[in-house]
Image: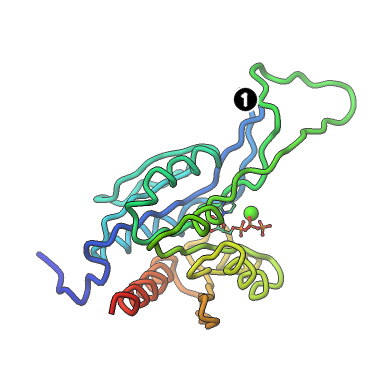
Amino acid sequence: FFKQKEEQPLKNKRVMITAGPTREIIDPVRFLTNRSTGKMGYALAEVARDLGADVYLISGPVSLSPPSGVKVKYVQSAEDMYQAVMEKFSESDIVIKTAAVADYRPKLVHTEKMKKQEGDLIIEMERTRDILKTLGQEKTHQMLIGFAAETVNVAEYARKKLQKKQADIIVANNVKLDGAGFGSETNIISIFKKDGTQKDFDLMTKKAAAREILLEAAADLKKGEG
Ligand code: CTP
Ligand code: CA
């Protein structure tokens, strides 16, 4: 069977999606990560595919099966993700940065397992590269969609991220709200756009949220082309 054209607003569009957490190695048995499960990113990949897009999913370590018909590349660290994203950036039409990228990594990676000592341990950390910000600086024609998982001042932080990262859309959610947290099947999102508009949505499944985000992006692409 095939779908009608109006149901495939992303036909012939190349959509790159990053999902899940990153892992920053401390030593051969330890790493730093975060609570991202990849559900929102994988939902976006599935729905983008259904809307006709050619989907490339760059995934951190998660326990989900990737949607069929989607190209997947697995990465571990923020730096790995940076390299994978940059490699395919020029040939992407839309980039959606759902991944929860580590902001810091241990400055030293120990090649042997660290042994415990008396007293406290201090691990010195350095900043990772901001992938979305780099994309914002280097974009030519690509539409950039970022996420902002916040616990307070959601709208204010989302608008700041829109500006600082030169994104077209920031999807914000308050991860402290019931039904919007990590690992949940549902989300409560707000879409902030660079034209200053804000759209707040009620609680819905991550797939339904993905559909809202992608239809918004498709409509903006069409406006830009028209
Ligand atoms: N992001 C990224 N590279 C990083 C950190 C974040 O590409 N090194 C992206 C995320 O994938 C997300 C957006 O930037 O799409 C916002 O991430 P977030 O962690 O909310 O914002 P930060 O700029 O890292 O600020 P903070 O964590 O201090 O709120
Ligand atoms: Ca961050």
The quarter in which the N terminus is drawn is bottom left
Q: Nearer the viewer, residue 138 or 113?
A: 138
Residue 106 lies left or right of residue 6; in this view the side is right
- Give the residue displayed 44% in from the left and 56% down from the top: 41
Q: Residues within 10 Å of mark 1 (few under 14, many from 20)?
A: few
Q: Nearer the viewer, residue 101 or 160?
A: 160
Q: Position of residue 48 (x, y in %)?
A: 32, 62
Q: Position of residue 20 (x, y in %)?
A: 50, 49
Q: Amino acid at mark 1?
A: Val
Tell which quarter ligand 1 is in: bottom right
For the residue labelled by badge 1, is the local secondary structure a helix, a strand or a loop?
loop
Snapshot colouring: rainbow
Image quadrant of residue 109? top right
For residue 152, above or below residue 113: below
Q: How many marks?
A: 1
Q: Which residue is mark 1?
A: 29
- Give the residue displayed 57% in from the left and 49% down from the top: 101
Image quadrant of residue 92? bottom left
The quarter in which the C terminus is drawn is bottom left
For residue 142, above or below residue 131: below
Seen as rendered, the residue at the extreme top is 112
Q: Position of residue 188 (x, y in %)?
A: 53, 72
Q: Position of residue 83 (x, y in %)?
A: 47, 40
- Give the residue displayed 41% in from the left and 54% down from the top: 17
Seen as rendered, the residue at the extreme right is 119
Asked if the residue at label 1 sits under 8 Å from ligand 1, the reply is no
- Give the residue displayed 72% in from the left and 20% down from the top: 114
Residue 187 lies left or right of residue 5; in this view the side is right
Residue 179 lies left or right of residue 83; in this view the side is right
